[in-house]
Image (spheres, rainbow, N blue to C red):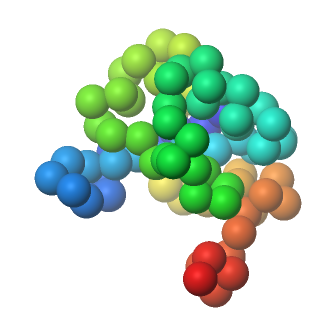
C-alpha cells in the first residue's frame, strides 16, 4: 500500500510530504511514475512531494497517515533506510 504523510516538512519555499510503500520499492516507483513524480524526488526509501500535490496523490490512492504511523509502517516493511546510511 502507498502511504503519504502530512506536508509539514519545509524546504525550498514550500512544505513537503513523503510517499512510501509498505510492501515494495517496485510498488512505490510504479505509483510515482503513474503520478508523474520525478525520479529526482526519490531518496532511498521515499519520494518527497510538494504540498500542492497532496490531494492529487490521495485521489490516486495514497493512504494518508500520521507521521508516527508512517514511520512505523515503513520500518515494519523492512524498506526504511536509517539516517546514518543516507550519507
Residue drawn 62% across the image and 76% down it: 86
- Expressed as whole percent of the image width and height from the top left, the position of residue 11 reads 25, 59
Q: Residue furthest left?
A: 13
Examine the image and state in which quarter residue 79 appears: bottom right
| Left or right of 28 in this view: 9 | left
- The answer to whether 86 is drawn above or below residue 54 in the figure is below
Can residue 69 be seen by looking at this rendering? no
Please identify the quadrant where the C terminus is shown: bottom right
Residue drawn 71% across the image and 52% down it: 73
- The answer to whether 68 is drawn above or below residue 29 in the figure is below
- Expressed as whole percent of the image width and height from the top left, the position of residue 8 reads 30, 52
- The answer to whether 60 is drawn above or below residue 71 in the figure is above
Of 19 and 75, the residue lying toward us: 19
| Left or right of 76 in this view: 30 | left
Examine the image and state in which quarter residue 74 appears: bottom right
- The answer to whether 75 is drawn above or below residue 56 in the figure is below
Residue drawn 66% across the image and 60% down it: 44
Please identify the quadrant where the N terminus is shown: top right
Amino acid at each position: 500500500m502507498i502511504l503519504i504523510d502530512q506536508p509539514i516538512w519545509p524546504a525550498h519555499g514550500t512544505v513537503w510530504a513523503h510517499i512510501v510503500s509498505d510492501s515494495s520499492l517496485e510498488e512505490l516507483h510504479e505509483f510515482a511514475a503513474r503520478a508523474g513524480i520525478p525520479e529526482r524526488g526519490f531518496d532511498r526509501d521515499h519520494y518527497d512531494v510538494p504540498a500542492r500535490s497532496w490531494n492529487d496523490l490521495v485521489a490516486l490512492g495514497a493512504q494518508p497517515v500520521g507521521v508516527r504511523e508512517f514511520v512505523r509502517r515503513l520500518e515494519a516493511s523492512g524498506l526504511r533506510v536509517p539516517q546514518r546510511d543516507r550519507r
